[in-house]
Image (cartoon, grey):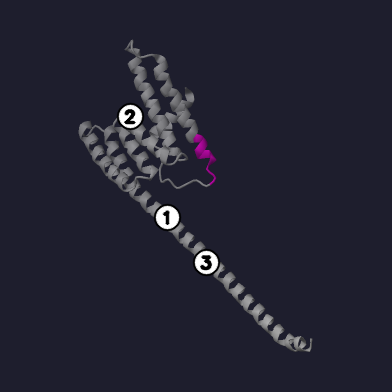
Amino acid sequence: AVLFADQLPLVAEHHGSFLVGAAAVGALVVGLVWRADLLRTQRLHAEQIARERLHEETLKELSALWMRVVLEKQGLYQATEEPLKIRRRIQIALDEVSRFILRNPDFPPGYYVRAQGLLYQDALIQAEQDLNRAIALDPQFFPAHLLLGRVKLERYVLERNLTQGSIHLRDDDTRAFLEEAKHHFEQGWRLEQSERTPRRWGLVKTREDQVAEVVVEAL
């Protein structure tokens, strides 16, 4: 008992050193975890900024291509040049958009812009394919829904005119295009209104888009 009593100070000193060491290790671990979390947060923030800058740069490039398509298309409303020459220039501009899409295959606005140009060329089926691709990439991309509604409306008018002069096409067949047009317009309007923080698509509605929306609402 006397021997054990003599050892008590040594035991207390040993345990005290152990507790101090454990506390130091614990503090070190906490510090390392905190620093790791901080570095991770900083890295994620930097990656987010990089993505936003890339998005803006990509939109700027696409916007320049889109303006070229629009400017070439304006020639169709003027009588100064042959329509065939204007359509050829529109196609050249669309070829540039296609190369943009090859570089950015997962960027929905690229398909949207090409679909607009294809619509100017009366290539309705190809425009519809591009818009379906844009929606598949991002179902919330409401501009594609709105433009697809316009494409469906154009197809309805075209098929309707064909129906009147053919015994092989039924009115029910063409009516489906109109119903699909209404569906996509409503989907686009709903998505546009439900966006709490509107995304910067860099896309502006054309006069033709606005006219199509009015027509659909009247039908």
Residue at 37% across, 22% down = 157
Q: Nearer the viewer, residue 43 or 18?
A: 18
Question: Does dot 1 land on a helix, a strand or a loop?
Answer: helix
Q: Which mark is residue 51?
A: 1
Question: Does dot 2 land on a helix, a strand or a loop?
Answer: helix
Binning the other alpha carbons within 10 Å of mark 3 as few (below 14), some (14 to 19) or many (20 upward) gives few
**Label 1 or label 2, whichever comes before in sequence order:** 1
- Image x and y of residue 158, in percent: 34, 22
Binning the other alpha carbons within 10 Å of mark 2 as few (below 14), some (14 to 19) or many (20 upward) gives some
The residue beneath circle 3 is 36
In the rendered structure, which amino acid carries the disc numbered 2? Ile
What is the CA distance from the residue labelled 1 to the residue labelled 2?
A: 33 Å
The residue beneath circle 2 is 125
In the rendered structure, which amino acid carries the disc numbered 3? Ala
- Image x and y of residue 213, in percent: 45, 30
Q: Which residues are magenta?
A: 189-196
Q: Is residue 190 magenta?
A: yes
- Residue 215 visible, this orientation: no
- Image x and y of residue 43, in percent: 47, 62
Q: Quadrant of residue 212?
A: top left
What is the CA distance from the residue labelled 3 to the residue labelled 1?
A: 22 Å
Question: Does dot 3 land on a helix, a strand or a loop?
Answer: helix
Residue at 78% across, 89% down = 2
